[in-house]
Image (spheres, grey):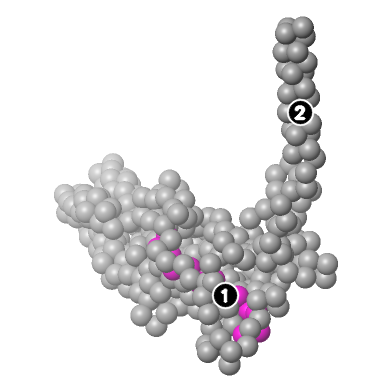
């Protein structure tokens, strides 16, 4: 009897526990705070305005094609549920925690250091307009093209997207009022151009989900004066100096080769000396083409000097003079044509 009573009690406890577990499993989930849901979701996607204000720039990193910048990112949308009476509240702008309301969660997509956010504020206007302002100091990746160096222009790109939200939920727009470059912004060796904004749709890999994307592109132009005055002009003057041998007697081989080889060694040493001022990139630039063309032009002078001297010493003086008369003008014209060809090829 005792064993039967114990067994019956155990079975009753198990059935009771199972019943309570089943009720808990089928119990309704706790209600979600409506303020955490997207506002007016039934009316379509929520427009979110994004503004970018650059405060300053630290550097352009040409080797890895990125740049360092500081500024403010503004994200603005309207949530009528958060509207308030300024007379009652005693203020026309009140702070709110992002954790307490719905936010579009706009992310910076081309920064490897996106976690370096210095400060973030979230405030509400009386009509329910919410603005999140993020102060950042970031490195941002952007494709660069230095083929026209030192006359190149670059686009500094800043791309934002909403995290885990399709075009049916969020549409990003430009906040024209909060876009631009600060008056105190400075970037050594570069001048600022126009800040343009491109709005387009993106797509997640291996999915059919489209999302909204904004790309802010700031054009910058390199200040080429330093490179023109200190590298290009001396290089071209070395080439012009090497052409004086075309007016030296074809019998004076020591003077011709002496001048040519001296200029040749000088321009090569000059190129090594200024190498630290050039961008370290894996493809040739306009500056590189000019320097190599100058070196080859002077080297051709040495071949011409040797040829006309050999002809004059072998009794073909008239032929040597005819060659000298042609190369005197052909060499400069060829050099200019080669430089023009390089520029045309780069600009193609």
In the image, residue 194 above or below residue 260: below
- Mark 1 surroundings: few (<14), some (14-19) or many (≥20) residues within 10 A: many
Report if residue 337 is visible in the image.
Answer: no
Q: Residue at x 72, y 13 (%)?
A: 6
Residue 131 disc label:
1
Report if residue 61 is visible in the image.
Answer: yes
Q: Residue at x 54, y 71 (%)?
A: 96
Q: Residue at x 65, y 76 (%)?
A: 82
Question: Picture coordinates of residue 22 (x, y %)?
Answer: 78, 33
* Secondary structure category for the residue under label 2: helix
In the image, residue 183 above or below residue 110: below
203 lies left or right of 132? right
* Secondary structure category for the residue under label 1: strand
Circles 2, 1 touching at the beta carbon (< 8 Å): no
In the image, residue 172 above or below residue 245: below
Question: Picture coordinates of residue 67 (x, y %)?
Answer: 42, 60
Q: Residue at x 58, y 92 (%)?
A: 87
- Residue 236 painted magenta: no
215 lies left or right of 271? right
245 lies left or right of 209? left
Residue 16 disc label:
2
Magenta span of residues: 126-138
Question: What is the C-alpha distance between the residues marked 2 and 1?
Answer: 53 Å
């Amino acid at each position: 009897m005792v064993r039967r009573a114990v067994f019956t009690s155990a079975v009753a406890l198990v059935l009771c526990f199972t019943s309570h577990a089943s009720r808990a499993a089928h119990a309704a989930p706790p209600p979600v705070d409506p303020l955490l849901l997207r506002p007016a979701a039934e009316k379509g996607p929520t427009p979110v305005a994004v503004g970018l204000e650059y405060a300053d720039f630290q550097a352009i990193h040409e080797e890895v094609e990125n740049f360092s910048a500081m500024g403010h990112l503004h994200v603005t949308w309207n949530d009528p549920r958060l509207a308030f009476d300024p007379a009652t509240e005693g203020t026309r702008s009140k702070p709110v925690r992002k954790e307490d309301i719905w936010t579009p969660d706009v992310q910076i997509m081309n920064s490897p250091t996106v976690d370096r956010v210095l400060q973030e504020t979230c405030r509400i206007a009386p009509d329910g307009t919410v603005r999140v302002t993020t102060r950042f100091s970031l490195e941002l990746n952007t494709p660069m093209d230095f083929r026209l160096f030192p006359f190149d222009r670059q686009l500094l790109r800043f791309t934002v997207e909403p995290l885990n939200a399709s075009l049916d939920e969020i549409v990003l727009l430009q906040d024209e009022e909060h876009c631009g470059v600060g008056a105190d912004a400075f970037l050594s060796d570069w001048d600022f151009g126009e800040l343009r904004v491109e709005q387009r749709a993106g797509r997640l890999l291996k999915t059919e989900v489209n999302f909204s994307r904004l790309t802010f592109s700031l054009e910058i132009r390199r200040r080429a004066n330093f490179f023109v005055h200190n590298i290009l002009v001396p290089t071209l003057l070395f080439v012009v100096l090497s052409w004086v041998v075309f007016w030296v007697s074809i019998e004076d081989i020591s003077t011709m080769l002496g001048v040519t080889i001296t200029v040749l060694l000088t321009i090569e040493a000059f190129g090594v000396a200024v190498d630290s001022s050039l961008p370290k990139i894996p493809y040739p630039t306009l500056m590189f083409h000019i320097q190599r063309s100058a070196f080859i032009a002077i080297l051709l002078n040495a071949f011409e000097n040797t040829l006309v001297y050999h002809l004059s010493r072998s009794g073909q003086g008239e032929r040597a003079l005819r060659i000298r008369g042609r190369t005197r003008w052909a060499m400069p014209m060829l050099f200019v044509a080669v430089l023009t060809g390089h520029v045309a090829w780069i600009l193609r």
